Amino acid sequence: MDTNNQEFTEGPVLSSDPESTEETDEMPVPRKRKKKKKGWIIVLVVLILAAGASGSYYFMQRQKPVSAVKNYLADVKAMDFDGMKSLLQSSDMSALDNADITSDAYSSFFKTINQKMSYKITKTKFNITTGTATVTAHIKYIDGSDIYKETITEFLKQIVSTAFSGSSLSEDETQQKLASLLEEKSGTVDDKFSETDINYPLIEAGGKWKIVSLDSETVRIMSANFVNVQDEITQSLSDMENQTEGAATTPAPSDNSDGTIDMTNEKFTLHYTQCRITKDLSGDSCLLVYYDYTNNGSSPSSAMVDLNLQAYQNGEALQAAIPENDETAIDQYMAEINPGQTVNVCQAFSLNDTSDVTLQAGEAFSFGGGNVKTQILKVQ
């Protein structure tokens, strides 16, 4: 046999490739470990992606009630009542029934006022299980109290002679005059802002988030802190008539003042000067109270429009009186004077007896009562 041509087929064939994994029976082990490691990585990636998807879903759901409140406040700002209604669970807008903001006569004024409103979401409580949420909004809005004060004062100046003659404006005429004055004063009075936080409860219904109800606080904001302009005017005119007749418009003050009525504000200055006892047309005793009235405003006005002076005996308001003799200072009560001018005014009150009289003075038709001064007068 020729051994030079013999082929050896027994035993393992050695590879000359140093990277080969088949040199021995133990070489495949590392490959199995790599496969196991790759499997764990895939599982971890899947878990991470699942957790991320779950978190994204929760975040998206949490944002839905926030978006609903933002849309709602945008409608409030634009005075879009249909838009507001669509975002309410019950679609109940009855909270607006007594507010002037729904009146066509005042719509232009309130739209101008509400366009200056701003808001931001500050807090959210969200329960994905029950489908409920509470979103807190911080709202900055126009406080219209100064505008209303100026409007009412001007309105009273324009109709004071009519009111005291027993005549009155129709509802339409009153609305037209008030609407005109509101727009005029909103352009001349400096903007005064107020801020508040409102919690809006929401509920998910049919896949949509709705605000539970229209609340009174939102209505107040839309109304610039004033719900019914005409009601306030009506009350002011009633107060004026009552004051002229001597009826009490405020509770009787306690008889513990020994000071002198002396007050000043942006509208007027009031300074008590003297009092005296005389007879009225019926021959009964009456009290004449004298004071200096100065117009501190920017337009003509009168003591009758600007201030409220009342007299009490034993807690009972004294009626207005007409002295038997002419008193020129009484005429100054209704007389309009120019800004910066001062006149001496007299008001007469019927006396019930000879007990002390308590005077109470303050700003007429003031919001929240305003500043009040009292003084005790000795009749005997």
Image: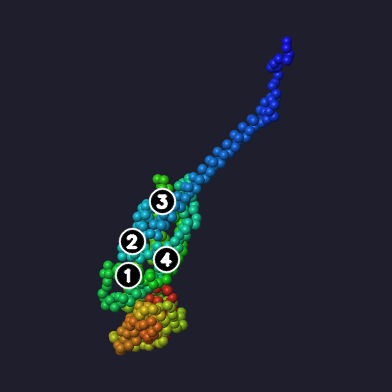
Q: Secondary structure at mark 1?
A: helix
Q: Quadrant of residue 221?
A: bottom left
Residue 153 lies, in percent from the top left, at 36, 74
10 Å crowding of disc 4: few (<14), some (14-19), many (20+): many
10 Å crowding of disc 1: few (<14), some (14-19), many (20+): some
| Amino acid beneath label 4 | Ile
Residue on which disc 4 sits: 142
Q: CA distance from mark 4 to mark 3?
A: 26 Å
| Amino acid beneath label 1 | Ser
Answer whether labels 2 and 1 touch (C-beta < 8 Å). Answer: no
Q: Is residue 32 left or right of residue 368?
A: right
- Looking at marks 1 and 3 on the same chain, the residue that comes earlier in the sequence is marked by 1
Q: CA distance from mark 3 to mark 2?
A: 22 Å
10 Å crowding of disc 2: few (<14), some (14-19), many (20+): some
Residue on which disc 1 sits: 180
Badge number at residue 190:
none
Q: Quadrant of residue 362?
A: bottom left
Q: CA distance from mark 2 to mark 4?
A: 18 Å
| Amino acid beneath label 3 | Lys
Quadrant housing the C terminus: bottom left
| Amino acid beneath label 2 | Thr
Q: CA distance from mark 2 to mark 1?
A: 16 Å
Q: CA distance from mark 1 to mark 3?
A: 37 Å
The residue closer to the viewer here, 289 or 337, is 337
- Looking at marks 4 and 1 on the same chain, the residue that comes earlier in the sequence is marked by 4
Residue on which disc 3 sits: 210
Badge number at residue 102:
2
Q: Nearer the viewer, mark 2 or mark 4?
A: 4
- Looking at marks 3 and 2 on the same chain, the residue that comes earlier in the sequence is marked by 2
